Amino acid sequence: MKEPPAIDYSDPRHEHDAPREEIYEELPFYDEFRVPAGKPDPVTSDGTMSVRKVVRHLARGNRYVIRVTGDSMEPRIEHGDLVLVDYTKEPRPGNIVIALINGAAVVKKFLRQKGRVILRSTNPKYSDIEIAEADQFVIAGVVLRIVEGAV
């Protein structure tokens, strides 16, 4: 069986060298709101929203893009990273989530231990956050991936 010819990626006519606009779509980007990676902060935003282009196969109506601040999720998520979030996905233990605790937002790893919800940082400098029964707790989305590094 004959092998296919090698692709010459240095050829300026190669189709993957130039970005193609048709492979991108726009998702909501809450550029005035930053989700903290450290301690939960009250959600304060004037509701302004712009759009951010992402690769088409990632763009769905149940997703948004948001910027992370703080270093508690380093090295996985760094200060200033943009993350793609799905707000309909059911969180599983080990997922990184955007959580609202008593009206304050935070990005953390979602865990369950002995029936209790634990939110954990990937940076060992930070303590776990244990959700008490009296807390108002909502998952605002599961982080699917980092869209782009700090800008």
Image (cartoon, rainbow, N blue to C red):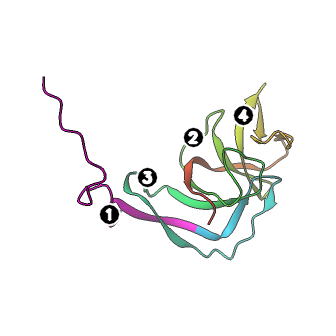
Q: In this view, does 81 lie to the left or right of 60?
A: right
Q: What element carries label 1?
A: loop
| Kind of residue indicated by mark 2 | Glu
Q: Nearer the viewer, mark 4 or mark 3?
A: 3
The numbered mark at residue 20 is 1
Distance, label 2 to label 4, CA atoms, is 13 Å
According to the picture, the residue beneath numbered tag 3 turns out to be 58
Q: How crowded is mark 4: few (under 14 residues within 10 Å), some or many (20 or more)?
A: some
Magenta part, dominant SS: loop
Query: In the image, which residues are magenta?
Result: 1-29
Q: Nearer the viewer, mark 1 or mark 4?
A: 1
| Kind of residue indicated by mark 1 | Arg
| Kind of residue indicated by mark 3 | Leu
Quadrant hosting residue 93: top right
Q: Is residue 79 left or right of residue 91?
A: right
Q: Nearer the viewer, mark 2 or mark 3?
A: 3
Quadrant hosting residue 131: top right
Q: Do the residues labelled 4 and 3 touch (CB within 8 Å)?
A: no
Distance, label 3 to label 1, CA atoms, is 16 Å
According to the picture, the residue beneath numbered tag 4 turns out to be 111
According to the picture, the residue beneath numbered tag 2 turns out to be 90
